[in-house]
Image (cartoon, coloured by chain):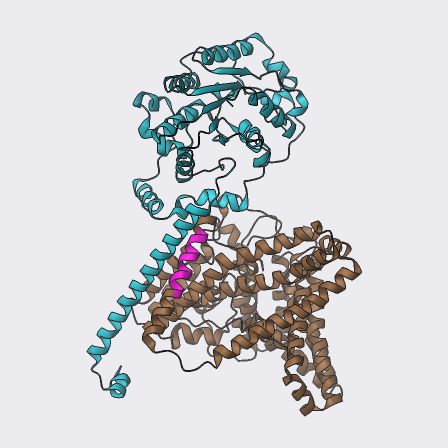
Chain colours: A brown, B cyan
Amino acid sequence: MYAPHERPPPSAEPLVNVPSYEFLAFAAVVAILASLSARPGWRRAIMLTANVGFLLTFSHTAAQLAPLVGFLALGYGSAKFFERYKNRALFAVLVVVIVLAFCWLKHYTFIPDSAFLSFPYVTIGLSYVFFRVLHLVIDAYQDALPEPISLAGYVSYTLNFTCLVSGPIQLFADYRRTESVQPASLSLTDVGAALDRIVVGYFKVAVLSPVLWTAHAYSVSGLSDASDLIGRVLCGVFVLTVYPVYLYINFSGYTDFVIGTARFLRLELPENFNHPFVSEGFIEFWGRWHMTLSNWWKTYVYGPLFMALIRRFPSPHVQPLLGVVVYFVTFFFVGVWHGQTSMFLFLGVLLGLGVSVNKLYQIEMTQRLGRARYRSLCRDRWYSTLSRGVTFSYFAFASLWFWSTWSQLGSFIIRLGPLGLAGTVAVTVACSALALAAFKVTLDWYANKPAPLAPAPSLYMRTAWYAAIVVLVLSVTVVLSAPAPTIVYKAF
Amino acid sequence: MTTEQSASGRPSAQIGSRRVSAAFAAAAVAVIVAIVMIAIQNVLIERYFPHLARLTTDFSPAYLEREIASMKNAQAIVFLGDSVLWGYRLPADQNAVSLLAARGCVCRNLSFKSGNPPNAYALERLMLAADVRPRAVVIEVNQSVFNQADMEYATLHPAIAALAAPLLAPSDLGLLTLPPAPAPFVQRTNHALSSVSELYAMRADIRETLYGDVQPAPLPHLTGDMFEGTYDLAPLGRSNVGVHFLEKAADLMRDRRIELVAFMTPTNHALMHEYIDNRQYRRNELYLVRLLASRGAHVLDLDHAFPAGEFYDNAHLTPAGQRRLAMLIASSLPH
């Protein structure tokens, strides 16, 4: 939340964390105020006040906000300039300046330490603000914005408190539509659905996440204690597989929470997850995991880069391979965006490799088998089961660079040894393939189940279920009695 | 609604009242589910939450009550003391009381980190009020808690204060620095929630059982001057709050004919030589020994009994020190 090299004093902790009861209370107050008048101007004013006010809760002095404000000012100035003037060279320069400013504020290690600001400052949500700012600047240059952007509209959009901390990344046109042009309805059904999301999201973050994190911590310590090969392999499997599940539960829980909360404000935020672990390839995975992030990168990096390379190398034989290269570059930067150290640089390499090799594989298999046979193969149950296992296992492997350190990885390798490593990989692929196959079967059954029960019993069963979850969440948070549970992606 | 009307032919008022009824029914379902779940939690906690080897750092009134209630017919030997007897820097199974329990002693350790004579007296009152008659009470007497500059001087643990304050005489309460009372609304809310939910009442104990206590900082190289001022060398007397409550604790046990064993806390004289190897320190030790002995207590003067290697600091014992303490106390316990 603060620039990495500075730790704020305890008294400087934020007043409102996400997800938390305080955040819900804050959103409730804003929702009530916003509903006092049907005028769009009133609603926009309340949202703007709430968005700025929420940001202020993360800071105790104006100086702490100055860098973020400066970054926003740079973005606004650039967007307004390009609404009117289309200067290609200046556009390229300003995009680079915005990217470098982001890297500077986030303390990327390729920038010398002496260049950084020496005082603590707020960087909450900066990684996501960065995407919104760049999106506005690029769309302003390309005349793709629905309307000229006002200062108030810009501030409200970039600092939307419902998704400030960790997204989702919503495009301006979509935000504008739901904020003032066509706010979402708020019927009883909508209220119920929103409450469902909030309860489930909080349950994931407050109950499931700590359990999974504890399991992960135990597996890491268990790996160093395990004496025989089987024990080490089992611990290795848990070390590898628990963290991605934890990450999914934690982040999707946050997303559920903010989507549900935003709904009370009649804002519709985009979805971020679509059962990512049932993906049968890494490209499909990124269409289901952190979808708003991957969509942004595909729209603003993959697409333009691919088109530029096609223009440069128009040969139809080369174009599929260009896709491979551009996938690598795009997802390399996705990895690098996650952090400032060499671990994340390597994460970028792995993510890029995963997607580009997947693409290369698709190209190769299509050439060898022909499109129809390849599609038929992909529909084969065992093939898709294996594909799911391999995809999840690769993501779990790449995630090691997300949460561990080089020395920790070294100690894992030494501890497992060659046999242990091979066993860990084999067991991970096999078990995840089977587990995810069962999960997919359950998902498909649920989607295709017979006609739902009559509304009345279904309403009471759902109410009972969610009441039970609420009691569980309250129980766990009472026991923990700690600050609001952390979400991993708040660090970015 | 117009669509619903035309589809079903029902008037909108009827649809609206059905919705309201459904909403009330759903709310009733939610409340019933919540009540049932809280009741299940209460049963599970009452049945399965363990009796811990020692009190947690932030033990709750509910847990303390539960512990005392469980001693009702146990004829246990109850240990009252501070962090030394609690086993600071050690796992729960390595303090002297746990070692004695492992050898068959029916012992209960009600020591805790900020233990002192006022807390010991209050615990005795609580036990007697709950019809608990221990087989014997063992009190650790640490000279440092009689120091008026000590943080724990004349204080009560919040959980003990919450339960024992009504049992103490106003004159006794007036001598103590009680924990600040929360706002009345907060107090009433806490009380209401604690009476309904065992989980809420014992949340601190549950949390510490699940996650463990905060780990103490690593020990630096210790020198005696780091503990300068720990021991007050002014002559002890009845005006000292610690002495006042120690007397009352001993008198209470004598009046109820409950055997009282007391031991003077072992002290690291090698470390503290410059500050405590003098006549006044010894006078205060003897004063306390005689105070207790004159009230029928069997007193063990363990002040000088331990070598320097069995201390972590001025008073907290290593596992070897705790073993020695268990051995020395064992000979004085009723069989």
Let me know if residue A316 appears in the view. Answer: no
Which residue is located at x 48 percent, y 27 percent? Answer: B77
Q: Nearer the viewer, residue A152 or B263?
A: B263
Residue B183 is situated, as x and y percent measured from the top left of the image, at 32, 40
User: Within the image, what quadrant is residue A102 found in?
Assistant: bottom right
- Left or right of B57 in this view: A222: right
Picture quadrant of residue A437: bottom right
Left or right, B126 with reference to B219 = left
The residue lying toward the viewer, choosing from A15 and A469, is A469
| Farthest right residue in view | A418
Can you say whether B327 is above or below A135 in the image? above
Q: Magenta span covers which residues?
A: A465-477
- Residue at 52%, 13% in the rendered image: B285
Residue furthest out toward the front = B335
Across and down, in percent, residue B315 comes to: 59, 23
Q: Taken as a whole, is the magenta stretch helix, strand or loop? A: helix
Residue A21 on the magenta segment: no
Please say if B86 is above or below B25: above
Q: In the drawing, does residue B310 fall left or right of residue B280? A: right
Q: Is residue B319 left or right of residue B104?
A: right
Quadrant holding the N terminus of chain B: bottom left
Q: Position of residue B175 (x, y in %)?
A: 36, 21
At x 43%, y 72%, the residue is A268
Q: Give the x, y percent position of residue A459.
A: 34, 72
